[in-house]
Structure formats: structure tokens, C-alpha cells
Image (tube, grey):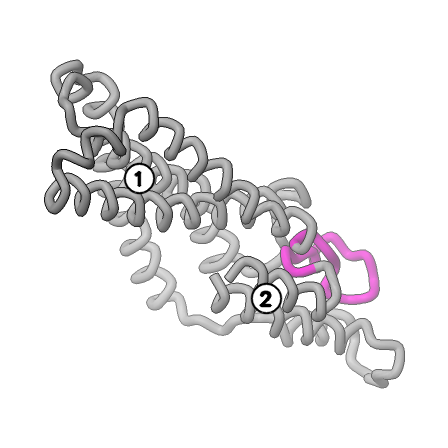
Amino acid sequence: MSLILNSSLERSDALTGLHGDNVQSDESPTQNLTSLDVNTDVYSKVAVTLIYIGLFVLGSLGNFITVHTLVRKKSLQNLQSTVHYHLASLALSDLLILLLCMPIELYNFIWVHHPWAFGDAVCRGYYFLRDACTYATAFNIASLSVERYLAICHPFKAKSLMSTSRTKKLISIIWTLSFLLATPMIFTMGEMYANALPDPGELICTTIVEESTIKTVIQVSS
């Protein structure tokens, strides 16, 4: 996440230069906008697109089958082990990342870098949901690891500590905490014009707050 936010900082610095009152330039708005372009040849875009499509199809299908099987199969739900709850939560977070984030990334970050085509709400929601699901994935892996450690190394203690009710509460806490940690993205990201003139063709999705605020968000989120 820090890497992504750092790249956002760099874009924010570029925009600050474009909007700065003390910056003198004879470039037209169109020329300023070209500084934000990413020159990627079409062959690289096609290659990345094929990789994205493969990951999207396989990942979505695999995680959907995992969630469906773990939720629907009564034989799995009746097991004393609570590992299937952790696996279902992990598969759900991965599935949401694939469904909600990959299509937007493929269109607006690989093929069409600007203008941002999905509006301010989707811009904020994209970064919020992406970070929330990423946090949830990390927490789910950690909780699953702890559950497996207790089940193998301390089997008798695990039965009392990792009961079904406690596991459900733990997973609820994981998702709640993930959404809370991702909340700052709603206020730090947004839709704005790349240049001073309000041209719809220059809309981008980027950081909309000062650099000091972004640094604070990075420190807290990390």
C-alpha cells in the first residue's frame, strides 16, 4: 500500500507544479496534460491485458467455488474445526478485489490513463474498497495461521479458544477493522482536473489533499 500511496504522492507533486501560482510556463493545458501520459506500447498493453484476464477468470472462478462450497456444504460446517470460516473470509476478500478493482485498473490504468471515466464517487470508492479488501486479506491470513498453529501445537486449548462463536466474532472484527483502516482513502482520494482549466477531458483520480496529510495517512495506515 505504501508503494501505491508513494506513487500517488509523486502524481500529487506533479499536479502541484501545474497548479502552483509561482510557476511560469508558456505551455498550453494540453501540453501540460501530456506530462501525465504513460507511454506504453500496444504490445505491452495487450500482454498485460491477457495476464489480467487470465488472473481475473481463474481467480474469480476459484474463489467463488471456494466460498460457495464452504458456505453451502453442511458436512464442512459441522466439522469441529473452524478453519472453513477463515478460508471463506479469505476467499471472499480476494474475490472482491478481483471483481471490484481489476476491471477499473485494466481500463483506466492500463489502457486509458485519462480522463477518469467513472466519477468522483467511484474514484473514492475504488481506493477505499481496494485497501479494505487488502487489509482483510492480510488479517485473514494472519488469523488462519494462528488458528492452524493452535490446532496443531495446542489442540486441547484450541477447542476452547477457537470456538465457532469466537471465530465468527473474530472475522467480524477483521472486516470492521479493515473498513476503518481504509476509511481515510475516502477523504484523501478524489476526482480533479489535471490542469487549471475545467476540461472534462483532463479529469484524473488522484490525491486531493496536501502532501503532509498523505504522509500522515501513510504513517497511520502502515
Contact, mark 1 vs mark 2 (Cβ under 8 Å): no
Residue type beneath disc 2? Ser
Q: Is residue 132 left or right of residue 64?
A: right
Q: Position of residue 162 (x, y in %)?
A: 26, 32
Residue interval drawn in magenta: 189-207
Identity of the amino acid at label 1? Answer: Leu
Residue at disc 2, secondary structure: helix
CA separation, marks 1 and 2? 27 Å
Identify residue for label 1: 90
202 or 105, nearer to the observer: 105
Q: Residue at x 39, y 66 (%)?
A: 42
- Residue 24 lies, in percent from the top left, at 85, 85
Taking the view exactly as shown, the residue that stands out farthest to the right is 21
Q: Earlier in the sequence, mark 1 or mark 2?
A: 2
- Asked where in the image residue 147 lies, by quadrant, the reply is top left
Task: Examine the structure image and report whether residue 5 is included in the region drawn in magenta.
Answer: no
Residue 192 among magenta residues: yes
| Residue drawn 47% across the image and 58% down it | 111
Figure label count? 2
Q: Nearer the viewer, mark 1 or mark 2?
A: 1
Q: Nearer the viewer, residue 175 or 153?
A: 153
> Is residue 48 visible to the viewer in this orientation of the structure?
yes
| Residue for badge 2 | 8
- Report x, y in % for residue 206: 64, 59
Q: Does residue 13 appear left or right of residue 199 in this picture? A: left
